Amino acid sequence: MNQIAVDSVRGRVYAITPAGLFLSTNHGLRWITVGGGVLPAGSLYCVAVAPNGDVYVGGTQGLYRSPVLSAGLAWSEV
């Protein structure tokens, strides 16, 4: 695991691994892959949750944002 970001208000945990970005909504018991097709796996190196709940992921190919309501399922390049 490269990095973890926690959204304690919404109970979400995001983790970057060499395989991509993962999301847990149950304190790490189960993980799903998010950002497939948009986020470049293998080149991500940081993840952060903004106070409003938006998620930001940075990597060698740019910075991406997921709005709070999409829970990490929709991404756009910033």
Image (spheres, rainbow, N blue to C red):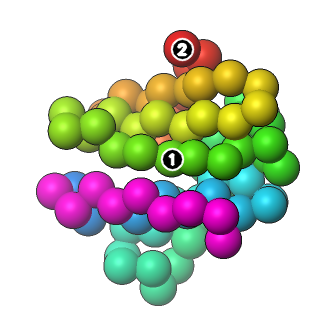
Label 2 sits on a secondary structure element that is loop
The amino acid on which the numbered mark 2 sits, given as a three-letter code, is Val
Label drawn at residue 78: 2
Residue sitting at 68 percent across and 23 percent down?
62
Q: Where is the N terminus found, in terms of image quarters?
A: bottom right
Q: Residue at x 45, y 79 (%)?
A: 28
The answer to which image quadrant residue 75 occupies is: top right
| Of the pair 58 and 37, the residue shown nearer to us | 58
Tell me: residue 66, above or below residue 33.
above
In the shown orientation, is residue 21 left or right of residue 65?
right
Q: Is residue 9 above or below residue 25?
A: above
Callout 1 crowding tier (Cα within 10 Å): few <14, some 14–19, many ≥20: many
* Residue 74, image x, y percentages: 53, 31
Circle 2 packing at 10 Å, graded few (<14), some (14-19), many (20+), is: few
Instruction: Place residue 32 in its image quadrant.
Output: bottom right
> Magenta segment, which residues?
1-9
Residue at x 83%, y 49% (from the top left corner): 42
Q: In this rendering, would 64 be left or right of 41?
A: left
The residue wearing badge 1 is 47
User: Does 17 sit above or below residue 39?
Assistant: below
Report the front residue among 74 and 47. 47
**Residue 40 falls within the magenta-colored stretch:** no
